[in-house]
Image (tube, grey):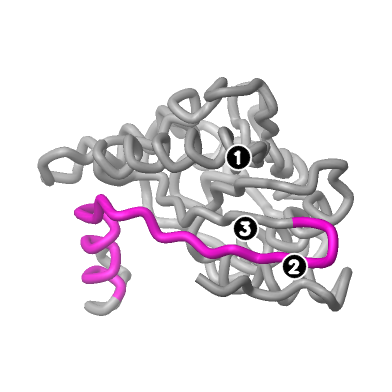
């Protein structure tokens, strides 16, 4: 957090202590989306509340689209390039390492297993692969060069990102929001719960409207 502004630190702490579930609903002529704002590290009670809300909507016939870039089956070069951009490998283990440095009661790492298999088995990981993240980044900003030290350092070692962290936001946020919108639009299901990072909600409606102008925010 050393490079963050005071405002960002306050917002980060707010997310870590929050237990209330924030959500938004988007509708078009044929579909309805219930978007739940997620954080990867948060209060255990927050995740319990998310689970309860998912169960409630599953009883209404919704399916679940969830976010997760899976780093468990990724090649080493992709992992090292990711680490150069992010500062760590954003896997369950990586987030657990960050958690070990956070001294707040009740904080835990998001575990999607908590949200799967509720009411029905219609749960779908709707996200891009680690290789797609790096490929999209390099296509837009150029190849990521790894030094000998970056090639040899322990993968589980945390450090300050050394390249392109600001550029990465356009891939991690904007590119993936467009991907999510396309999957919603293409889906055979007309009622969808989405659990994705809170920042994705901001641009999702605009991306949906670029595919179908009838999309709008539903009244509370």
Q: Using the image as rendered, state which of residue 206 and residue 167 is in the foreground.
A: 206
Asked if the residue at tag 1 contacts the one at tag 3, i.e. Cβ–Cβ closer than 8 Å, the answer is: no
Q: Residue at x 84, y 58 (%)?
A: 30
Q: Quick one: label 2, few (<14), some, or many (20+) residues within 10 Å?
A: few
Q: Is residue 95 left or right of residue 145?
A: left
User: What kind of element bears circle 3?
Assistant: helix
In this rendering, the count of numbered labels is 3
In the rendering, which numbered label is found on residue 172? Answer: 3
Q: Is residue 35 left or right of residue 9?
A: right
The picture places residue 203, in percent across and down from the top left corner, at 64, 72
User: What kind of element bears circle 1?
Assistant: loop
In the rendering, which numbered label is found on residue 60? Answer: 1
The picture places residue 103, in percent across and down from the top left corner, at 11, 44
Q: Residue at x 77, y 72 (%)?
A: 215
Residue identifier under label 2 = 141
Q: CA distance from mark 2 to mark 3?
A: 14 Å
The region drawn magenta spans: 8-31
Q: CA distance from mark 3 to mark 1?
A: 31 Å
Q: Quick one: label 3, few (<14), some, or many (20+) residues within 10 Å?
A: some
User: What kind of element bears circle 2?
Assistant: helix
Q: Residue at x 23, y 63 (%)?
A: 14
Residue 17: within the magenta? yes
Q: Using the image as rendered, state which of residue 29 and residue 166 is in the foreground.
A: 29
- Name the image quarter holding the N terminus: bottom left
Query: Could you tell me if residue 143 is visible in this image?
Result: no
Q: Disc 2 or 1, which lies upstream in sequence?
A: 1
């Amino acid at each position: 957090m050393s490079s963050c502004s005071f405002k960002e630190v306050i917002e980060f702490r707010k997310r870590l202590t929050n237990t209330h579930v924030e959500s938004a609903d988007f509708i078009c002529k044929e579909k309805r989306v219930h978007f739940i704002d997620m954080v990867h590290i948060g209060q255990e009670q927050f995740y319990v509340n998310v689970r309860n809300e998912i169960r409630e909507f599953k009883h209404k016939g919704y399916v679940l689209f969830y976010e997760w870039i899976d780093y468990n089956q990724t090649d080493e070069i992709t992992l090292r390039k990711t680490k150069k951009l992010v500062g760590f490998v954003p896997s369950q283990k990586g987030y657990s390492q960050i958690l070990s440095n956070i001294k707040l009661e009740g904080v835990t790492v998001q575990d999607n297993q908590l949200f799967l298999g509720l009411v029905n088995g219609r749960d779908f990981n709707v996200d891009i692969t680690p290789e797609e993240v790096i490929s999209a980044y390099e296509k837009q900003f150029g190849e990521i060069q790894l030094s000998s030290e970056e090639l040899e350092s322990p993968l589980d070692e945390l450090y300050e990102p050394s390249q392109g962290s600001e550029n990465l936001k356009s891939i991690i946020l904007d590119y993936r929001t467009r991907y999510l919108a396309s999957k919603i639009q293409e889906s055979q299901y007309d009622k969808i719960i989405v659990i994705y990072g809170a920042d994705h909600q901001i641009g999702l409606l605009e991306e949906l409207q670029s595919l179908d102008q009838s999309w709008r925010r539903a009244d509370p």
